[in-house]
Image: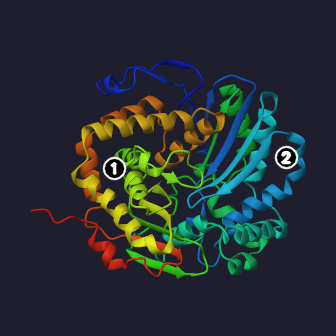
Amino acid sequence: MLSSVLRRAPSLGPRSARCMSDVVVADASVAATSSGLNVASIPTGGETATITAWVNAGSRFETAETNGVASVLLSSALQNKAGEIAALGGMVNGSVTREHMIFEAKVLKENVGKATALLGELVKPVADVAAGKASVEAVQRAAAHAPADVIMQHLHDAAFLDTPMGMPTFGTPETVAALSADDVAAFAASNVTAERTVVAAAGAVDPAAFQGAAEQAFGSLPTLPAGAVEAAVAPAVFTGSDKRMRFDSMSSAHVAFAFEGAAFGSSDFYPLLVMQAYLGSFDASSATIPAKNKTSKLAIDQGEQGAATAFKVINQSYKDTGLFGIYFNAADNRLEDSTWYSLWNLVRLCHKTSDAEVEFAKTQLKAKIAEDLSSNSGLAADLARSISLSGRAVSTSELLAEIDLVDAAAVRATAKKVINDEDHALAAVGPIYELPDYNWIRRRSYWLRY
């Protein structure tokens, strides 16, 4: 984790010698209560603080019949406490991912205790879910008109066929309409438990006082009986498949394809972060520098050939799996070129990655990490995420040390494991009549080298 105070990283043995000499380091206070609740904080001073609660109860814990129940629980709670949120001041919001329900409050330092108590109320189900259902249905309608959101939902469906990981995070109009308050209460009773919850804060917080406030606010959460083992979540089995939705009326095509990536914190997690930084991103609608003048070879190729007008790397890591690939936007008659150059640059990582390229990518990655963790919100979210997914707080010095250990050989090895001659999942929408078929793409996931 990063604080707002610069100081030299503490020694970590041999690995520390390869870290940046001056990094931003913070001491995180982490404690597990008797109920299993994890409480963590990073005091950085200032006048404001961010408090966040991460509950390991996202959409992958739902069933096909109750898909969207986590979103209804979260939205109903926010609607029910709208008056208290307004009185508190600052900003309180929430979101649902495939693995988590996330609540966040950004407040003045004198309101940290009140905000913590409010988050403790927000994780509980409410009796009336009508307003919450209406809010989720509005989000569904808005998402239907956002191609990037549509594509990522369909990509997960293609990648994790017939598993909860492939279901939409907001459910479907039919499943949400059928949900009742009893369904929401049953989901909360089974999944919103102390063991699955991490409460973290960063900014103007006193660790001891915050721990006491968190224990009081979340102390009523149910816990597992002594000796009981929590039921295992359904595995996210990756399947190579293809989803295409042709709409010739759209001005351009949106395409996403991905291979099975790496779980959070696994041995391939850090090389994939470096690969993501190396490949870069581009969007012609907001760029001030043409793609052909960027440092990314993928951007240069796409720009010089007039292929994709926008692209970004898909690198999503979950507790037990991940996705790694490319999302791009291109004109209907440039889809084959866009796909070819995307694949060529991905497979190139397996064979031609140089030490100089990796060192440059690592510098880019560290700068991005520093940017992400320069705010209280970023600090608190990173702290909660690492504890929830890996069971412990991953310090910034450790993170940077792991990145420094990545070299060109490690990148090539990970790329060969993830990309080389591997099945992929694809989702596409728009005028995609020239998008190559699955076997064409599959054949270009490897090079014939003699």
Q: Which numbered dot is residue 85?
A: 2
- The answer to which image quadrant residue 237 occupies is bottom left
Answer left or right for 182 relative to 99.
Answer: right
- Distance, label 1 to label 2, CA atoms, is 41 Å
- Location of the C terminus by quadrant is bottom left
Q: Position of residue 275 (x, y in %)?
A: 36, 48
Q: Which residue position is annotated with label 1?
A: 268
Q: Residue at point 43% right, 45% down?
A: 294
Disc 1, disc 2: CB below 8 Å?
no
Q: Position of residue 228 (x, y in %)?
A: 52, 57
Q: Helix or strand or loop: what does disc 2 sit on?
A: helix
Answer left or right for 367 relative to 356.
Answer: right
Mark 2: amino acid? Ile
CA neighbours of label 2 inside 10 A, class few (<14), some (14 to 19), many (20+): some
**Residue 284 visible:** yes
Q: Helix or strand or loop: what does disc 1 sit on?
A: loop
Query: Along the line of sight, which residue is nearer the eye, 284 or 81?
Result: 284
Q: Residue at point 42% right, 45% down?
A: 277
Q: Earlier in the sequence, mark 1 or mark 2?
A: 2
Q: Position of residue 302 (x, y in %)?
A: 41, 58
**Residue 39 visible:** no
Q: Is residue 281 above or below residue 208?
A: below
Q: Residue at point 46% right, 76% down?
A: 161
CA neighbours of label 1 inside 10 A, class few (<14), some (14 to 19), many (20+): many
- The answer to which image quadrant residue 151 occupies is bottom right
Q: Residue at point 23% right, 50% down?
A: 352
